[in-house]
Image: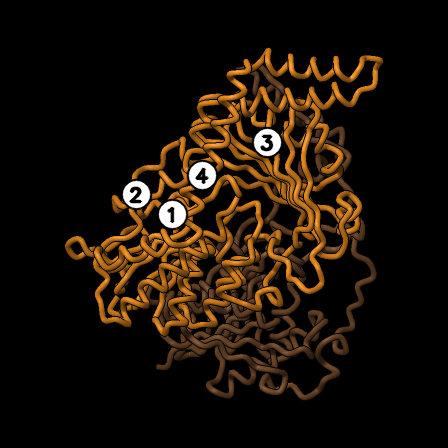
Amino acid sequence: MRGPNIVVCVKQVPDSAQIRVHPVTGTIMRQGVPAVLNPYDLFALEEALQIKDRLGGRIVALCMGPPQAEAALRKALSLGVDDAVLVSDRAFAGSDTLATSFALASAIRQVGQEQPVDLVFTGKQTIDGDTGQVGPGVAKRLGMQLLSYVCRIPILDMDSQSIVVHRWTEKGVQVLKSKLPCLITVLEGTSEGRFASLPEMIRAARQPIRVWNRQAAGIEDLSKIGLKGSPTVVGKVFAPSRRAERAECIEWEQDQAEKAVSLLWEKIRARQPELVEKLSGDNGGENGQERVSE
Amino acid sequence: MNERFDAIVVGAGPAGTATALTLARGGWKVLQIERGEYPGSKNVQGAILYADSLQKLIPNFREEAPLERHLVEQRVWVLDDRSYIGSTYRSPVSSDAEPDRYTILRAQFDKWFAKKAQEEGVLLICETTVLDLLREGERVVGVRTDREQGEVYADVVILADGVNSVLARKAGIRPELKAGEVALGVKELLFYSQESLEDRFGIQGDEGVAIEMVGKITRGMVGTAFLYTNKESLAVGIGCLLSDFRKEKVPPYVLLARLKEHPALRPLLRDGEMKEYTAHLIPEGGYKAIPKLSGDGWLIVGDAGMFVNSVHREGSNLAMETGRIAAETVIELKQAGEPFTERNLRRYRQRLDQSFVMKDLRKYQHVHEVLDQNRHFLTTYPELVNRAAETLLRVDGVDKRAKEKEVTRSFRKHRSYRGLFSDAVKLWRAFR
């Protein structure tokens, strides 16, 4: 039995904790903001690495971005990924989620020519775009089963080419079974990241990263990528104004917690009567597990 | 780990990177280990970059280094509680010369600098802390990191792990830092639009201004403050000896807040959006605090070796200079087929003694003591000179001779003729 061939899509994003909004134009200022590996992608990487720990196989980290996005792939390599491909071409500039998913899908097909791809992982979304659209877009283009917001992968059976995942929904956890190949977007907090060993760090620092331009990524149709392939139009970007209301402190004497709670309850009721109504009428909400089979 | 390197450099600040880059150019197989997420992520400086030491390593750095502004104006201010008296030197860079002083943001500069070393073949790994030096007998033969299978060996280890140099202290190479030998600096980065900065400081394009400040702002503690212009931000900070902070029990942030509220600074800093707040130790012990700089299989460079000229606010250039000289020393030894013994590596110190690094540090070796023992330089004099200026400039019907007498009297009242004379001698001797 061969181990699975896995592609993990990662993105380099500006560290949103350090981002500034231009005080005059209201646009995001990327200059000088350090770039990091999209934090959600770390969970995707870890899920893939755990599969490799169990079943062997091979992991390729795939990233689309400018040359400096190499740093994100370096990080992926240090964690134990076998190979790294940076898809980088000026023709990709201005790509929205539609064009990006086209380019990534094409690159994954190229990876698949070396060896068929069984699983594609992405984070649930990026912290800069926050759309969560690219993963599903790639799945659709590759004709792969999409399994989004996955929080656990209890079973992966290469013999029967099937996988069982836990998918987080608003109503509870769905347990889904699917055939391979499929694309999985991974929820945050699913696992603890790993700390690479020193030999792995040295290997990662030394390993060359493959850089694919448009042609190498197998893209011929220029109208599908970059600005041309991006129907999304950004109408306006603005920083929301500060909220006027402030947090309020409720003070209470010792041993009078109950009084404080009822005071808090009163305040909530006064401000948001709908919410209170909903909470009291919604007692038997479904919190159990739903079982959905393929 | 079985793999061996020619050299291991601990730290990816200016000192470590200058060392690694020089070694790699000499054909060495170099492993550089950085604790932070990327080079520069943990590094703090004002920051002014002096071109010379960098130029020796990367002659065309001006074309590609992330520089903020080149300094065309440097001001020195002596402040009392509400006024200041000062001097300004302003000179546009002439068209046939290149600027030699720049403001930089270290997070960006260090990353770029390290990239240059990587291009020369240095193997850099980040997010890895070196915990210990590995020894065979007395000889240092490698390092142990905090990662699994984290031991790695090399012919020589260069410590460039900064002012705290936990490694050097743990290895008994350097004594514990003394509170009187380090300053604690705190700094804010305030954001402005480019046009607004140009208006505030009368500059254009890439021109920049640096203001160094002394006086009552440090509340009698030995220290200085600064204000530097970056492209789209101002760096404002203040630093004093750690021992003084401890004695006076003034929190550093309070000192910085007061500085920002000083009538001389407030208008320059108005409407700034704070982007960054950082604090760092600065080795200010000078010449006398310099530890043993090399031993069997190891050398120490940059802040870890206490190489800071606190009078002229030079540090990162000394880091690069000591890094380069350390690398050149071991390259020469290797070429001559000589081992990295304690005795042979003493050549590093000998070479430093011949360079401006040690000459400058030796020149100012008494400055801190003098200031430490004569606190009135930092409190009484700033007040006296500011008051004298006010007296002489005010036109109020009092004749000029009487005003001059009043000024002289005020000086004599606070410092007798004898005190004034001895102060002058002390200062002259400290700075000569």
**Chain in brown in the render:** A
Q: Residues within 10 Å of mark 3 (few under 14, many from 20)?
A: many
- Against B46, residue A81 (above or below) is below
Tell us which disc is closer to us: 1 or 4: 4
Distance Cα–Cα, label 3 vs label 4: 17 Å
Counting from the top left corner in percent of width and height, residue B297 is at: 24, 58
Mark 2 against mark 3, which lies toward the viewer? Answer: 3
> What residue type is disc 2 on?
Arg
| Mark sitting earlier along the chain (1/2) | 2
Residue drawn at the location 67% of the way across and 27% of the way down: A265
Q: Quadrant of the C terminus of chain A?
A: bottom right
Q: Which residue, given by chain and number where applicable, does mark 3 sit on?
A: B214
Q: Earlier in the sequence, mark 1 or mark 3?
A: 3
Q: Position of residue A93 (x, y in %)?
A: 70, 73
* Residue at mark 1: B304
The amino acid type of the residue labelled 4 equals Tyr
- Residue marked by disc 4: B364
Chain for disc number 2: B
Residue B280 shows in this picture? yes
Given this view, does label 2 or label 4 mark the residue nearer the observer?
Answer: 4
Query: Which residue is identified by label 2?
Result: B174
Confirm whether residue A174 shows in the render.
no
Q: Residues within 10 Å of mark 2 (few under 14, many from 20)?
A: many
Residues at marks 3 and 4 touching, judged by CB atoms closer than 8 Å: no
Q: Secondary structure at mark 3?
A: strand
